[in-house]
Amino acid sequence: MMKIRPLLLHSLLSTIVLVVFFNQTILNLNHVYFSRSGDGFRTYYGIFFHAKYDTTPYRIDAMNYPYGEMIGFTDCQPPVSNFIRFISNNITDITGYTTGIVNGLMLLSVLLASILLFLILRRMQLPAWYASFVALGITLLSPQLMRLGGHFSLGWMLWVPLMIYLLMVFDSKRAYYISILVCLFATLSGDMHFYFLAFWAFLFGLYWVYRWIWRSNYTFRKSDLLHFAIQVLLPVLILQLNLIINDPVSDRTANPWGFYTFRGHFATVFLPLYKSYIPFSGKLAFGVNYQWEAMCFIGLVASVGFFYLCTQWIIRCRKARKMVSLTGNKLYDFLLGSSVIVLLFSFGLPFILGLDGLRKLTGPLGQLRGVARFGWLFYYVVNIIVFRSLYINYIENKKKNVTIKLFFVGALALLAFEAWQNAGKYQHQLNNRIEELDPADNTFANFCKTTVNTEEYQAIIPLPYFHIGSESIWIEQECDLMKKSFIVSMETGLPNTGMMAARSSISQTYQQIALTRTPWKHYEILDNYKNNKALLLTVGKCNKLSTDEKRLIGQAEYLGESHELQLYKLPFDSLKALPEKVTFAPRYQAMIDSLASHHDSLAGQPHLDKSGRDKPKEITASRHFQNIMEGSVKANPAKKCYLRFWVKNYAHDLVARSQLLVVQSGPQHETLEEIYTDIFRHFKTFDGEWALIEIPFTPKQENEIIKLLVKNYDLKGKTLQFSEFSVSQTALE
């Protein structure tokens, strides 16, 4: 009882602090939204839809109709959504409490993180009062806390302290049941988010390297191999097998964007950047605009303490002329050393040293992009080690020096202050209301239910269309439409053709966006629609619709509007027949034929490449811009022109991420204007393996030289093919 009492008291204290900091959130748990849009609201929507409407545990039909998606790629927390789904299908419907369950579990993870940190510090023989104070401080200062505002799965704070705690327990007992617990929690957390599986694999993988080299003199027992297999290999195998069984997609990107953008930096870990309580903190960035993903500040006490410990360790090593322990404990030395290795990886090392090819050969590691998140392991470990050392130093010297006492109290006060600054007012950012989902006003819900007869429709097409996730093309939402179209989906049970996920199928992506581009011959995706029912168009009331999207609306029947959202009914047959009405292909060919024989409005060559798509221009992709077209243009200044060309194999991974540079020059080759853009921003239409790119530009003077350049760092050495370059003042709408 004496051992359990401190734990119970700490749990009670942590609960009280959590209630004080998040009281309004807790009181309105099912009615506040930690995020009103973006990734956060997508998670609310996906979990609700999966629990209420889906029929299989690992496929979600909420987005990317008619294909759906593997639920893990949508960040919709399979363990949570399937728990709600199981209870609702077998006991009682709790889908109406999805928001409260999701919010409550995230806050519960904060409480569990504090309890686990307390247990870790107690295992280090620290007194209960001190362990409790420090555990709460580390929890509330954690950079993970900020993920509650959007990246919900990453906001589950218990996983990293849990892996540290289980490693410490295993190191002392080496029991198989502990290895099984490691396997269970590694699999569960990896099912929540792949990054946590990587954390477990890194920490326990490095642990077994450490045991093999420093503990066992390069010898392995059979039991060691079995423990390693259970702890590291089995979770990876289970989740990989789940992916193989439930995921039919074979064309996800092998090179997600962002590895070098969303990496950590020395300043974002050790310096208090942009902290309101330090007036000059913004200047510590020295003009560098760090991504918010990179922010992983460990706290001033841990930052100073880490470098102090390292300096003292170097001095002791030089005096002893051999390697000595930094902490006085081999396991703690390992924890700190391994967390430093993982921290260096979060900085992008060694790949930022010109070894990007090595990164692409590392299999699953090549799929990582937000690698700054690996700094979280260092955050927890370095704070644990520094505050342990701080207490030991205080106990050893408190009778000798009053300054030590003041420094000790000051360090604890600083931890408390920084924790309060980080978490004290954070609930105001979480307590968001969504008018369309307000339980006190069912106007929007009633509008959806009375306007839409679900039996007449098969899916929702949001306009302006949005699609994020393929890593080949980004179509951001406009008019706050993602949230509104998702809410219509929640109210009606109709799946959405829009997409907000990660690493979605490239081929499916282009089939989807073809619906909102000019049709060439026919819409390929309609061959895979599940029936001939109508499509529900959710149209945002804003001036962001493209001509092609307006064309779809023109074929539809207006149903009504509410909350700046219009609903239309688009018959399936009308959509299917649209390519025949548009006749874009013959009009484009007529324009090409005209340009080939007449040059009265656009003079000079080669403004038109006559070779056709059977003999494309080929270049080898490079990190430097290469000229692929140059010609003189005679046109009316200030009147819009269109630069068009075809690109082959556009649906191959990374091709659409090719960067373009359009240079407008005068007769003496003086630069008039430069347009930097990407291929994926200018898809006009699709024809088999070819895509037509259309880039609008405005001439600055009558006689201009137009030059088109391209580069693609990610496809270095691969062939890019282009054809049929043309410049015209004809808008082919």
Image (cartoon, grey):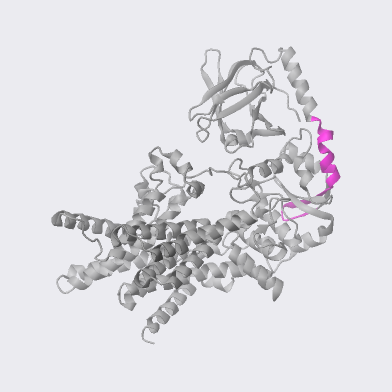
Give the magenta range.
560-583
Inspect this view and state whether residue 159 appears.
yes
Q: Residue 354: image x %, image y %?
A: 40, 37
Disc tally is 0
Inspect this view and state whether residue 149 appears.
no
Q: Residue 453: image x %, image y %?
A: 83, 59
Q: Is residue 359 above or below residue 277?
A: above
Please report the residue visible at 50 percent of the width from the left and 69 percent of the height from the top: 109
Quadrant of res 90: bottom right
The C terminus appears in which quarter of the rendering? top right
Q: Is residue 123 above or below residue 303?
A: below
Quadrant of res 432: bottom right
Most extreme residue toward the bottom is: 1
Q: Check residue 322 for magenta coloring.
A: no
Q: Residue 339: image x %, image y %?
A: 36, 57
Q: Residue 295: image x %, image y %?
A: 42, 53
Quadrant of res 548: top right
**In the rendered view, does 476 fall on the left or right side of 511?**
left
**In the rendered view, does 466 fall on the left or right side of 255?**
right
Q: Check residue 574 for magenta coloring.
A: yes
The N terminus appears in which quarter of the rendering? bottom left
> Which residue is nearer to you in this view: 676 or 507?
507
Most extreme residue toward the front is: 222
